[in-house]
């Protein structure tokens, strides 16, 4: 592409900074820090197989899942990028047991944002060269400026997010984010190390034709979800839908956002509370979903209105084109 036609991420942030309520520059600097960290992680992801960075790291995270070496690397990169620049006052990562309180070295600690992050979503796919990603979410703190953060700063409803986004490391690397004024996507030119606005004002198509769910869990789904899957497979109207499932939330969501589809990770007999994390995965993706004209739900309620009770809380998650999500919810309601 001819780069002169495209606005850089830095230019876009400066031009749209006026949209940030209460902004004094910190949120712009925060997005810039995420941009920098994502380029470092992208470089390492692209080296997988050439350096000793693939495979398990020998540790488990808070949820008892085996950490991959790239999980650990990405976690360190994002924590360092966000904590060493006097930008935020607190951070929580899916890879950490507890939140991190950041006491600014500045004389007057005026930092007012906290970040929740999934440093490397879908990391188990790294070994087989499948796209992975980073998911982030930004809130304004609840505790007084100048004090140490507390758990209440992190256990906020998704409606309180001031920014959220993801980076997908694939055939091209893209950073997609929202500050509540639409969704915009930026593609990295690796030759220049610069992100360019390539997908402005991203919206779900009015009608979708893709459903993304791990059908290997079919026997453990609710009757409503089973019936919805059969509905997707029926030869009627614009159906059957196409089944596409990568196993990386960022990659599955990104495809469905562009092409039109629904992503489902419902509760199962084994995981009655769901599997995905409300704070690190569901809330930021739900914010993006709604900003792109879609719906995000746990099957009953709007994801963004759920009140978190713990840092690593799990919930069922369904998001995508409005019509498709509404239909899936109708199937669940008929089973009550």
Image (spheres, grey):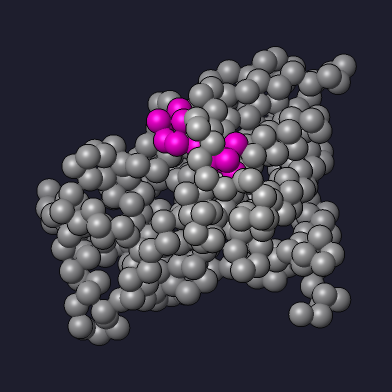
Q: Is residue 82 above or below residue 253?
A: above
Decide if residue 46 is on the left or right side of residue 4. left
Residue 147 counted in the magenta span: no
Q: Residue at x 41, y 56 (%)?
A: 247
In the foreground, 160 or 85: 85
Decide if residue 76 is on the left or right side of residue 133. right
Q: Residue at x 25, y 72 (%)?
A: 232
Is residue 275 in view from this perspective? Answer: yes
Q: Residue at x 63, y 30 (%)?
A: 91
Residue 37: image x %, image y %? 73, 45
Residue 107: image x %, image y %? 87, 16
Q: Is residue 177 above or below residue 293?
A: above
Q: Is residue 273 above or below residue 51?
A: above
Q: Is residue 223 above or below residue 142?
A: below
Decide if residue 144 is on the left or right side of residue 95. right
Residue 328: image x %, image y %? 26, 61
Q: Which residues are magenta?
A: 60-72
């Amino acid at each position: 592409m001819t780069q002169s036609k495209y606005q850089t991420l830095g230019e876009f942030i400066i031009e749209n900074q006026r949209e940030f309520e209460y902004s004094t520059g910190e949120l712009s600097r925060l997005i810039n820090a995420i941009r920098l960290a994502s380029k470092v992680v992208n470089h390492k992801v692209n080296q997988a197989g050439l350096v000793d960075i693939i495979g398990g790291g020998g540790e488990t995270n808070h949820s008892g899942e085996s950490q991959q070496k790239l999980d650990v690397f990405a976690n360190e990169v994002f924590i360092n990028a966000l904590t060493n620049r006097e930008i935020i006052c607190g951070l929580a990562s899916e890879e950490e047991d507890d939140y991190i309180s950041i006491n600014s070295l500045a004389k007057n600690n005026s930092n007012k944002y906290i970040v929740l992050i999934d440093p490397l979503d879908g990391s188990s796919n790294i070994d087989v060269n499948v796209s992975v990603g980073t998911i982030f979410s930004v809130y304004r703190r609840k505790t007084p400026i100048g004090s140490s953060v507390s758990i209440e700063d992190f256990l906020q409803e998704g409606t309180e997010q001031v920014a959220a986004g993801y980076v997908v490391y694939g055939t091209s690397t893209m950073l997609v984010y929202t500050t509540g004024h639409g969704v915009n996507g930026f593609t990295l030119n690796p030759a220049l190390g610069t992100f360019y606005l390539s997908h402005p004002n991203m919206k779900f198509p009015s009608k979708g034709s893709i459903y993304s769910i791990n059908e290997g869990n079919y026997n453990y789904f609710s009757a409503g979800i089973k019936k919805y899957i059969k509905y997707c497979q029926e030869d009627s109207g614009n159906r059957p839908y196409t089944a596409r499932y990568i196993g990386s939330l960022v990659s599955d969501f990104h495809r469905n956002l562009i092409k039109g589809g629904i992503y489902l990770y419902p509760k199962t007999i084994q995981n009655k509370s769901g599997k995905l994390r409300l704070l690190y995965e569901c809330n930021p993706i739900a914010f993006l979903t709604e900003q792109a004209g879609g719906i995000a739900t746990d099957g009953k309620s709007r994801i963004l209105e759920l009140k978190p009770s713990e840092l690593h809380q799990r919930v069922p998650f369904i998001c995508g084109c409005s019509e498709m999500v509404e239909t899936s919810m109708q199937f669940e309601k008929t089973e009550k």
